[in-house]
């Protein structure tokens, strides 16, 4: 039975994390809305496709890869009261994240057009998308560094500071969006280009804030020498956890990217409707992500302290709140889909298709919440391989084959694609729950060494 103290701890961790991600999603949402109001479906498609490519790289290698490895090791070290080891994992994680961020940013800048062509972008969408990626590749470098720094803070149980950083990012981004997209305060109207510049400046500002916080608060007493003092053994251990987590995110994101390429086959209306519906749905799964962060942190700390029952209880509490909040979002998708779509675009054809997509999206919300939280619990306990295997099966052996059948064989519309993703999440959520419970039982029996 969960205690008030455990519930309070989960909420103290999860709510700032939820707030942080909601703030980032608000940036994306408002970005899409402003670009859509300025340039219509071509601009929405260009920014949507370019963003998918950029954040696919960032999520696979850093946000859901290196950051997960860092959070898990630092949290378990803190749970075991071994702060010197926590410092080593944190500093080497920052070094590793910096190296990877440089490589990814250079690849995105150099091959922007190639990625868009592979995605079947043509004409104005290709032209605008290329501009967006080249500019945003600079901003995503600072975003990835900030993500690794935030991973260390979350492992300590500090989710409030990353939320404050997100507040700074959103304020600067929205203000500059308004100025640069529409040409306010004497600036020229730059449209998509203005959106990319605004995002880059905002991400750089957020990174500077987190860096200053680190120096002022002396987080784990990390200094520059700790970061540049390459420790092969620590790096390898982080990579051993990060690689399966990266592969899991890669399995999901690359399959989703392929799905987007397939949807491009259905035309601009279908693609724009899908992108806007996805943007709206993304707001709903931020609570799932926030409570997954809480589950990863608390499961990691409890497993480090060898308190396995508490690890299970904390994760169950996180799952309960995630399902409750995302279930409420399901109701909104069913009852008010028109005003949600209308806020983004005026095109009646896009709105009509998007409404149906949102209504189908209501089915998958509770399953998505369960999958995220129990997957986070598994990662916190040090098991990143099982979530990778489950995600691979659901993405590559359920989602993609069914989407191919729906789009290319049955010639059905994009709405049926959303039924496919509902099936995928129902499978993934159920299996994550089952394997989390098995993992905790193994740890209690001493089957797996931590």
Image: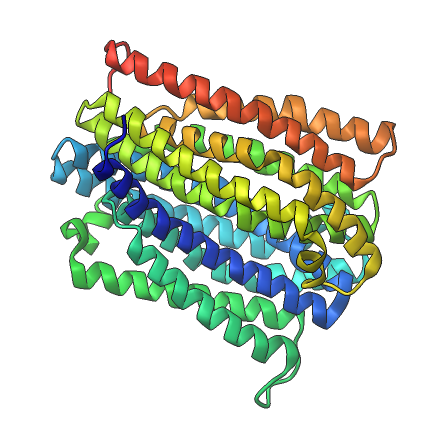
Q: How many marks?
A: 0
**In-image side of 17 versus 331 (left or right):** left
Q: Position of residue 332 (x, y in %)?
A: 61, 49
Q: Is residue 249 above or below residue 45?
A: above
Q: Is residue 39 above or below residue 11?
A: below
Task: Report the residue that reaches farthest toward the bottom.
Answer: 186
**In-image side of 335 versus 27 (left or right):** right
- Quarter of the rendering containing residue 56: top right
Q: Is residue 89 above or below residue 279?
A: above
**In-image side of 94 versus 360 (left or right):** left
Q: Quadrant of the C terminus?
A: top left
Q: Position of residue 172 (x, y in %)?
A: 46, 72
Can residue 120 be seen? yes
Q: Quadrant of the N terminus?
A: top left
Q: Is residue 450 above or below residue 55?
A: above
Residue at the spot 48% in from the left edge and 43% down from the top edge? 325
Q: Position of residue 161 (x, y in %)?
A: 29, 57
Residue at the spot 77% in from the left edge and 61% down from the top edge? 41
**In-image side of 249 versus 70 (left or right):** right
Residue at the spot 36% in from the left edge and 49% down from the top edge? 15
Can residue 237 be seen? no
Residue at the spot 26% in from the left edge and 43% down from the top edge? 8
Q: Position of residue 62 (x, y in %)?
A: 43, 44
């Amino acid at each position: 039975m969960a205690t008030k103290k455990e519930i309070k701890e989960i909420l103290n961790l999860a709510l700032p994390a939820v707030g942080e991600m909601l703030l980032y999603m608000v940036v994306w949402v408002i970005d899409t809305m402003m670009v859509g109001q300025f340039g219509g479906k071509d601009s929405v498609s260009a920014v949507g496709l370019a963003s998918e490519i950029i954040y696919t790289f960032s999520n696979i290698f850093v946000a859901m890869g290196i950051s997960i490895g860092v959070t898990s090791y630092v949290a378990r070290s803190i749970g075991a009261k071994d702060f010197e080891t926590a410092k080593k994992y944190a500093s080497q994680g920052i070094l590793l994240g910096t190296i990877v961020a440089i490589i990814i940013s250079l690849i995105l800048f150099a091959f922007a057009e190639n990625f868009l062509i592979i995605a079947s972008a043509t004409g104005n969408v290709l032209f605008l998308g290329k501009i967006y990626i080249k500019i945003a590749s600079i901003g995503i470098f600072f975003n990835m560094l900030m993500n690794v720094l935030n991973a260390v803070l979350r492992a300590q149980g500090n989710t409030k500071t990353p939320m404050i950083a997100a507040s700074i990012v959103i304020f600067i981004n929205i203000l500059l969006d308004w100025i640069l997209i529409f040409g306010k305060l004497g600036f020229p109207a730059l449209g998509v280009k203005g959106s990319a510049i605004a995002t880059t400046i905002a991400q750089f500002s957020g990174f500077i804030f987190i860096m200053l916080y680190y120096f002022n608060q002396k987080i784990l007493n990390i200094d520059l020498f700790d970061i540049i003092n390459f420790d092969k053994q620590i790096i390898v251990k982080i990579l051993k956890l990060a690689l399966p987590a990266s592969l899991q995110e890669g399995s999901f994101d690359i399959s989703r990217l392929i799905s987007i390429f397939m949807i491009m086959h259905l035309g601009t209306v279908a693609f724009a409707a899908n992108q806007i519906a996805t943007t709206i749905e993304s707001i709903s799964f931020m609570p799932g992500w926030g409570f997954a962060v809480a589950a990863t942190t608390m499961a990691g700390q409890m497993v480090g302290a060898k308190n396995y029952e508490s690890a299970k209880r904390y994760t169950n509490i996180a799952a309960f709140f995630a399902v409750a909040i995302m279930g409420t979002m399901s109701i909104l998708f069913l009852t008010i889909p028109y005003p949600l779509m209308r806020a983004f675009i005026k095109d009646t054809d896009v709105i009509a298709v998007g409404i149906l997509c949102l209504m189908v999206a209501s089915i998958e919300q509770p399953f998505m919440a369960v999958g995220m939280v129990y997957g986070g619990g598994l990662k916190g306990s040090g098991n990143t391989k099982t979530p990778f295997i489950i995600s691979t099966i659901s993405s590559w052996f359920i989602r993609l084959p069914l989407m191919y059948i729906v789009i290319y064989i049955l010639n059905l519309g994009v709405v049926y694609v959303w039924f496919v993703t509902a099936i995928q999440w129902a499978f993934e959520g159920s299996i994550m729950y089952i394997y989390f419970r098995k993992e905790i039982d193994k740890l209690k029996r001493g089957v797996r060494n931590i």
